[in-house]
Structure formats: structure tokens, C-alpha cells
Image (cartoon, rainbow, N blue to C red):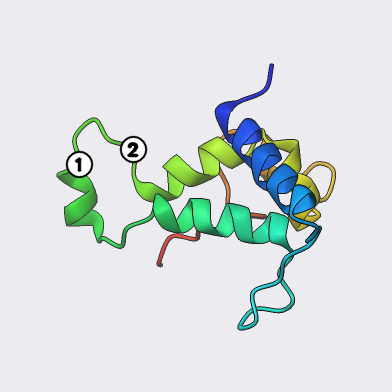
Amino acid sequence: MATSLQHQAACSQRLLKDSGDHDFRYRALPNLSSAQLFFIYYALDNCESGDAVYAGHLGHVLPAPYRVNLAVRHVLEFWDAFQCPDGSTMAQLPLAAACSVVRQDA
């Protein structure tokens, strides 16, 4: 079963293909593919910066790194875009940041 994030990634790639631009590159980040940019913008849209005190006041809301990593960890398109190796900790519990777009500040 495909997730909504997989459908969004597929739609993004289909729009690029239909426009004739199969691999759009952002001029300021030329080493990132259009597939990587999709997931980076997804992460940016769901991210926030906060310390432990802020996180403690979130209540029932997952902290941003988990909202992003939990969503992408099971999306093969993410694995393909970032070339996550087989056995990457992104597919294992507990959550780890071996191939994550967002990393928590130490």
C-alpha cells in the first residue's frame, strides 16, 4: 500500500516529466536531484527548531525530526533518492539518523 507521501513524490516526478524537465536542479544546490529536493522541501515544511523545554510543551505532537523521519523511513522513493544502503537504520526501530534529512541538534 502506497502512502500519501509516496503519491506526492510520484506526482512531483510526473509533473517534471510532463513538463519535459526530468531532473530539475536548483541553481544554488546543483548536486541535489529533483527527487532529493522534493524530500528536502517536505522536511523543511515539517521542521521547526526547538530545545528540550520546547519539545516538552508539545504534548501529543511528535517532535519535528520524528514527524519527518518516521514518514520517510518507509518510502522507497526516499531510499532511492538518497541512496540509503540496505540495512540502513532508517528501517529499524528505534528511530536513528543514519540517512535522515533532518538531524536533531546535539
Residue 71 percent across, percent down from the top left? 54, 36
Depth check, front residue: 49 or 88: 49
Residue at left offset 72%, top offset 47% = 13
Residue at left offset 19%, top offset 35% = 59
Q: Which residue is mark 2?
A: 62
Identify whether 18 is placed above or below 74.
below
Residue at left offset 64%, top offset 31% = 7
Quadrant that contains the C terminus = bottom left
Dividing the picture into quarters, in which one does residue 26 lie? bottom right
Residue at left offset 19%, top offset 45% = 56
Q: Separation of disc 1 and disc 2 at Cα?
A: 7 Å
Q: Is residue 84 visible?
A: no
Dividing the picture into quarters, in which one does residue 24 lie? bottom right
Secondary structure under the numbered disc 2 in the rendered image: loop
Crowd class of label 1 (few under 14; some 14 to 19; many from 20; radius 10 Å): few
Residue 89 percent across, percent down from the top left? 68, 44
- Kind of residue at badge 1: Leu
Q: Residue furthest top?
A: 1
Q: Is residue 26 left or right of residue 67?
A: right
Q: Residue furthest front?
A: 19
Identify whether 25 is placed above or below 85.
below
Residue 105 percent across, percent down from the top left? 40, 66
Dividing the picture into quarters, in which one does residue 54 lie? bottom left
